[in-house]
Amino acid sequence: MASVRLKEITKRYGKVVALDHLSLDVNDGEFVVVLGPSGCGKSTALYTIAGLESADEGEIYIGDRMVNEVEPKERDIALVFQNYALYPHMTAEQNIAFPLKMRRLGEAEVSSRVKRIAETLRIDHLLARRPAQMSGGEAQRVALARAMVREPVAFLMDEPLSNLDANLRLHMRAELKRLQKELKVTTIYVTHDQAEAMTMGDRVAVISRGRLQQFGTPDQIYSRPRNSFVASFVGSPPMNLIEGELQLNGHQISFASNDLTLQLPELAGSALRSETTPARVSLGIRPEDLTTTAETWSIFAQGVVYVVEPLGSHSIVDVQVGDTILKVQEGARYSHDIGDRVELRFRTEGLHVFRGTGGEAVF
Ligand SMILES: Nc1ncnc2c1ncn2[C@@H]1O[C@H](COP(=O)(O)OP(=O)(O)OP(=O)(O)O)[C@@H](O)[C@H]1O
Ligand SMILES: [Mg+2]
């Protein structure tokens, strides 16, 4: 096991900058999830660590050793691809044993390692079957076993659950998280699914266009997004963002858009006073920090219910304020219906202010 460190890695494909000065410090034994939209450079990052692609600039360390010039097979890293290809003519046992046989390990050693990993992944009962005789989730576990049986210093996983059905994904998500905690193998896990990232990672690295946007615990990423990209990429439904400007009237700072004006709390004042006003900003608020049913929060605006989406455990209500629609999280049995006038209340602690239209958090 070892730490993995990327220092200012840049990777270009012709004119495309796939990775742009990407730095990432993954501690020994840590589970880090790399999260970002399609094409942002997630796979490129993994391939660069594994040595399947070379970096144009920057340094890669595994443990204390710089590995830029080290051959992939000497890096002792296991990469699980999105399309895990098992050998169809081999049984699960033969598939798992394959990488060990390639390394010319003795028969007894191979069989004891295969047995151990099969127990860990709870696939003992599948060992005699061929891939065609397994479900997608079972084949996935066999593929993981094949990657893990070598006992590498780190695991790299590229969207390993993406071709499983929704239920199986949830199941495997929990299993993988547990397994990683048991084995304590440094793991870098790539996904574009924010729920997967939030639930699995010790820390999450959010990437957009090859650049690191934020690297922190799921709670930090969710509660204190560093910019409006992170704010809108993490959370379902995502954070509401309203464009407008900050206005200073005496001691009060308020936010004004075409459709609503909100007095911001004292707390915001001290952080925002140094901003030049009026300044273009986006105001951010998550659906759970808005309500139309409780009267506990003082800041409010008048709105009209646009649509109600019951989701079983709770409802998402779209509330229209002028031309702006805000998503509000309400309880399971929502009392209002389309067209009802409501008072939309904002939880002060849930307010975020981002500079410009795509900018950094200032509050
Ligand atoms: N071999 C290549 N030649 C040219 N461009 C490439 C190559 N591989 C990747 N790219 C480009 O580099 C960028 C990053 O690609 P990458 O595959 O790392 O994205 P990703 O985040 O893994 O996306 P996805 O979620 O769709 O898998 C993309 O713009 C892609 O088109
Ligand atoms: Mg990819």
Image: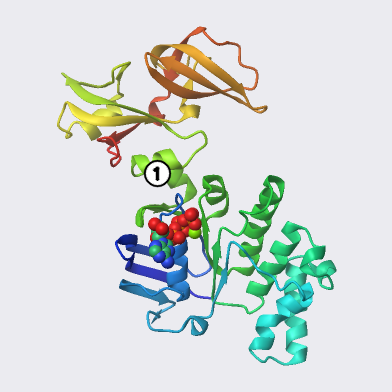
Task: State the image coordinates of residue 197 (x, y, percent, origin top left).
Answer: 53, 51
Q: Quadrant of residue 336?
A: top right
* Residue 20 in the image, given as x and y percentages of width and height: 31, 61
Depth order, front residue of 180/38: 38
Residue drawn at x 28%, y 42% as measured from the top left: 360
Q: Is residue 89 left or right of residue 199?
A: right
Q: Quadrant of residue 114?
A: bottom right
The answer to whether 299 is drawn above or below residue 146 in the figure is above
For the C terminus, give its image quadrant: top left
The residue that appears at 48% across and 48% down in the rendered structure is 218
Q: Quadrant of residue 144?
A: bottom right
The count of marks equals 1
Q: Position of residue 233 (x, y in %)?
A: 44, 42
Q: Which residue is mark 1?
A: 230
- Residue occupying image coordinates x 73% and y 58%: 136
Instruction: Characterize the local packing of mark 1: few (<14), some (14-19) or many (20 or more) Cα atoms within 10 angstroms.
Output: many
Local secondary structure at mark 1: helix
Amino acid on which the number 1 mark rests in the picture: Val
Q: Is residue 285 left or right of residue 185?
A: left
Q: Quadrant of the N terminus?
A: bottom right
Task: Let me know if residue 39 appears in the view.
Answer: yes
For the rendered model, the colour scheme is rainbow
Q: Is residue 177 above or below residue 315?
A: below
Question: In this image, 15 relative to 1: left or right?
Answer: left
Q: What residue appears at the point 77 percent right and 70 percent down from the top-left corner?
A: 119
Between 228 and 143, the one lying in front of the other is 143
* Label 1 near ligand 1 (CB < 8 Å): no
